[in-house]
Amino acid sequence: MAQAWDLGAFVVWAGAALVAAIAVVPALRRIRSALVPPAGTGGPGDLDGPARAGAARSALVASRGAAVCDVLFFLALALMIWQP
């Protein structure tokens, strides 16, 4: 960790992990809880309007968070490969 690119890559990786932990994983849990109801209460297609809107919002958060993680992972990988 003696060079700036080392620390930069580490910070970018940590940022990507933080985005995944704060945004993507909770959104996926909310989607799973909406789509897999308790036993005997109906199938996954039985979402009412608010539940469907909540699942769509969570899907958008998960998708955008995953896109941010992809960009950050690419930047970290670029820093580690090219070592500017």
Image: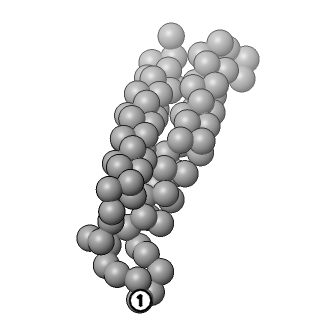
**Closer to the camera, 52 or 21?**
52
| Circle 1: element type | loop
Find residue 48 and report its image quarter: bottom left
Residue 77, position in %: x, y? 46, 29
What residue lies at 59% left-to-right and 45% top-to-bottom?
21
The answer to whether residue 84 is visible is yes
Looking at this rendering, what residue extends furthest in the front direction? Answer: 49
**Closer to the camera, 40 or 62?**
40
Looking at this rendering, what residue extends furthest in the bottom direction? Answer: 40
Find residue 52 and report its image quarter: bottom left
Please indicate whether residue 18 sits to the left or right of residue 56 in the image: right
Placement of the N terminus among the 4 image quadrants: top right
Question: How is the model colour-coded?
Answer: one colour
Q: Is residue 82 above or below residue 71?
A: above
What residue lies at 52% left-to-right and 51% top-to-bottom?
25
Looking at this rendering, what residue extends furthest in the left direction? Answer: 45
Residue 34, position in %: x, y? 42, 64
Find residue 81 and report its image quarter: top left
Residue 40, position in %: x, y? 41, 89
Residue 56, position in %: x, y? 34, 48
**Closer to the camera, 35 or 14?**
35
* Amino acid type at mark 1: Gly
Q: How many numbered marks have been drawn onto this rendered protein structure?
A: 1
What residue lies at 50% left-to-right and 59% top-to-bottom?
29
Please indicate whether residue 67 sits to the left or right of residue 11 in the image: left
10 Å neighbourhood of mark 1: few (<14), some, or many (≥20)? few
Q: Is residue 53 above or below residue 13?
A: below
Please indicate whether residue 27 sits to the left or right of residue 50 in the image: right
What residue lies at 37% left-to-right and 67% top-to-bottom?
35
Q: Is residue 71 above or below residue 56?
A: above
Residue carrying label 1:
40
